[in-house]
Amino acid sequence: MKKYPRLTVALIVLAVGVLLVALYFRDPHQKGLYPPCPFYFLTGLYCPGCGSMRAMHELLHGHPLAALRLNPLLFLLGPFVLAAIVYQGWRDLFRPAWKPLEISNRLSWFLVAVILVYWVIRNLPWSPFTLLAPH
């Protein structure tokens, strides 16, 4: 990324933009448009990302509650991930003197634990955990 940071960031922004436009116009609720989740296909269980594509589609159409129902973890952590990506891209393009974004080991392990707990409880067949499954 150091040799051509502006070109790299521009290509990433272009690729993400194309994917978001495709996701806006091609509804992932319809069967056959997108590949199924490999983990769900093989096990019948939801992974932490299951429902994310449909949630992004709902967010792009201005339906945050529908997105929340499809994948609460994406809905809650997504803004922080997006902010980190934007910060890093902005730093690479315009402010190389800015300190790189660093995440402590403690926070990293905490996030891993949150994702693993979410992965387990969204597959429990009892209420209220069934609310975490993508509907």
Image: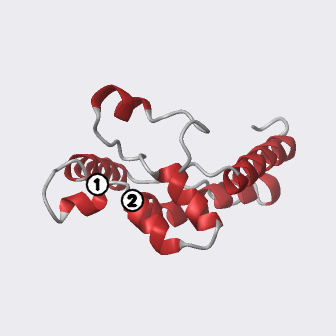
Nearer mark to the viewer, of 2 and 1: 2
Residue 51 point in image, percent of width and height: 44, 51
Marks 2 and 1, how far apart in space? 9 Å
The quarter holding residue 127 reads bottom left
The quarter holding residue 1 reads top right
In this rendering, is residue 82 above or below 5?
Answer: below
The mark that comes first in sequence, 2 or 1, is 2
**Residue at the image point whose x is 77% and y is 60% from the top:** 95
Q: Which residue is mark 2?
A: 73
In the image, taking residue 2 as reference, residue 111 lies left or right, namely left
Q: Nearer the viewer, residue 92 or 63?
A: 63
In the image, taking residue 30 as reference, residue 116 lies left or right, namely left
Residue 48 point in image, percent of width and height: 36, 47
Tag count in the figure?
2
Residue 129 point in image, percent of width and height: 20, 60
Secondary structure at numbered mark 1: helix
Name, please, the residue furthest toward the left. 126
Name, please, the residue furthest toward the front. 31
Q: Which residue is mark 1?
A: 114
Q: Callout 2 environment at 10 Å: few (<14), some (14 to 19), or many (20+)?
A: some
Does the CB distance between marks 2 and 1 fall below 8 Å? yes
Q: Nearer the viewer, residue 26 or 121?
A: 26
**Residue at the image point whose x is 43% and y is 67% from the top:** 68
In the image, taking residue 44 as reference, residue 66 lies left or right, namely right
Residue 31 point in image, percent of width and height: 53, 41
Q: Check disc 1 and give the amino acid type.
A: Val
Q: Check disc 2 and give the amino acid type.
A: Leu
In this rendering, is residue 26 above or below 4?
Answer: below
Name, please, the residue furthest toward the top. 42
**Residue at the image point whose x is 74% and y is 59% from the top:** 90
**Residue at the image point whose x is 41% and y is 46% from the top:** 50
